[in-house]
Image: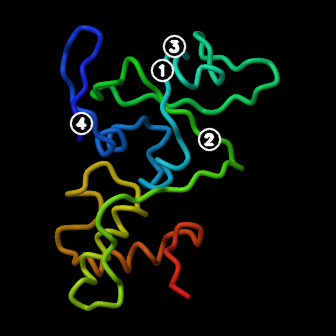
Amino acid sequence: MTLQADERGRITTKSQLVDYCQCGDGLTDSNIIEYFVNTYEIDIDGRGERSSISNANDRCRRGCPCHERVRYLPGHPKALTKQHIVRGANHNTLPNFIGRYFPPRDDPDEYPLYCACMLMLLKPWRCLESDLKLLSQTWESAFVDFLSTVSPKTRPHAPT
């Protein structure tokens, strides 16, 4: 998390987790990886580094495909100034995971944490405490339930 100041000198926090949790309804079905790989943020008025994609009226230019625009939910600090553009189907964007490695799935002591991490990455959620598993479930049983219903595209692959 970082701090940022707006034009009026107001300090707000900047957090990618807050961005994901408060993304607009058009991205509700996206897991956290899909959200960061398949979207990018621009100013609502179309100015900024991605201004060639959008103009002030949020319309596409002639010859340029119009990509879906999704605003943040009203409570988000950038709800009035930023929106997300959904990338086209054939883009090549890869996630870059920074920090500690993911727990191994073949270590019995680490397996519950592995299940929690995979659910957090692969299952769409807005609230970590309530959306990833039921209170009565273990992380392992929640992960098994998730795997029984998830599409093959989202399913984690076994190492080769």
Within the image, what quadrant is residue 160 found in? bottom right
Determine contact: label 1, label 3, CB under 8 Å: yes
Within the image, what quadrant is residue 104 found in? bottom left
Q: Which mark is residue 87?
A: 2
Tag 2's secondary structure?
loop
How far apart marks 4 and 3 lie (CA) works out to 24 Å
Q: Residue 119 carries which label?
A: none
Amino acid identity at mark 4:
Thr
- Which residue does the numbered mark 1 point to in the structure image? 43
Tag 4's secondary structure?
strand
Which callout, 1 or 2, points at the residue further toward the start of the chain? Answer: 1
Q: Residue at x 32, y 68 (%)?
A: 117
Q: In this view, does 87 lie above or below 120?
A: above
Q: Which mark is residue 45?
A: 3
Q: Residue 2 carries which label?
A: 4
Amino acid identity at mark 3:
Asp
Question: Horizontal and vertical percent for residue 1?
Answer: 23, 41
Amino acid identity at mark 2:
Arg
Which callout, 4 or 2, points at the residue further toward the start of the chain? Answer: 4
Which callout, 4 or 1, points at the residue further toward the start of the chain? Answer: 4
Determine contact: label 4, label 3, CB under 8 Å: no
Q: In this view, does 25 lie above or below 136?
A: above
Determine contact: label 4, label 2, CB under 8 Å: no
Amino acid identity at mark 1:
Asp
